[in-house]
Image: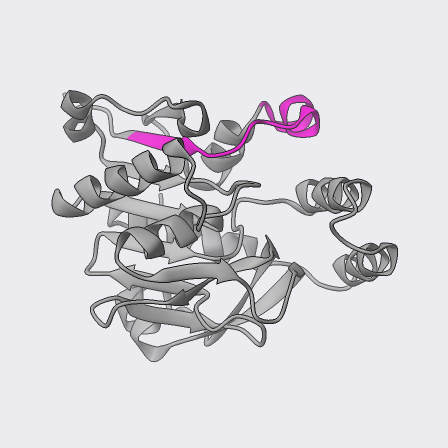
Amino acid sequence: MEAKKKYAVLLCAEDSEYVKNEYGGYLKVFMGLLEEEGEEWDAYRVARGEFPADGDVESYDGFVISGSCSDAHGDEDWIKKLIEFVRRLNARKKKLLGVCFGHQIIGRALGGNTGRAFKGWDIGVTPLHLSSSLSNFFSPLDVPPQLSVIECHRDEVLELPPFVEVLARSEKTGIEMFKCDDHIMGIQGHPEYTKGILLHLVDRLLDSNLIEKSHAENVKKELNEREPDREAWERLCRVFLKGKLPQ
């Protein structure tokens, strides 16, 4: 009997009450995007200092690093520990997918630079322009030259070392996606998000005075007019993480 595939999500933020009530927590949100029948999914709350034991790493077929309200260029102990953990996963050639903060942390761990985005907040449904090499990498999927994804970030990967390949850009962000060999991929956007999650985040940002009321209203208006390419992202992320077309 074939052993179950095992995956771990490294959670870099606490579950909001909204996400807990509506989705059962961020682990379930990621499982909604990535999980297939017969798999085992675990969560490690790395922002609390919970990491997989070194002896358990090999039991996992892949890892996912979530978004966060923290800065990827910060120096908190757990962030420094996460960067070292990413470097160990890279040395072992473990499959690793980073989303938003996770994308930035991986970029930093590989030797790149992160910081505040040159063009400020990007919140909404953003069209990404995909490189021809991305289409080749995911050739079985017949990926179009443009895909839209939900975004909510004010930081970005500013620079990557030459051995890391940029796969996508947008009008606001030069490094929207990247890959390192065939085992690491970063996505600045949130393919796992629903519009409901983003609307809740917009309200939280507004309540915290991190964005202006006019900005929040514009985001909500645009969300009524645009749709993310959720199904395409689901297939792309599953193919990357598992090396096969989804069933």
The reply, left or right, for residue 7 in relation to residue 123 is left
Which region shows up in magenta? 7-24
- Please say if 156 is above or below 35: below
The reply, left or right, for residue 179 in relation to residue 153 is left
Can the viewer see residue 36 in this picture? no
- Please say if 239 is above or below 125: above
Name the residue rendered at 65%, 61% in the picture: 121
**In front of the other: 246 or 132:** 132
Residue 92: give x, y in percent of width and height: 12, 42
**In front of the other: 83 or 62:** 83
- Please say if 195 is above or below 61: below
Residue 197: give x, y in percent of width and height: 67, 40
Picture quarter with the C terminus: top left
> Is residue 43 located in the magenta-colored stretch of the structure?
no
Name the residue rendered at 22%, 52% in the picture: 183
**In front of the other: 178 or 210:** 210
Can the viewer see residue 182 in this picture? yes
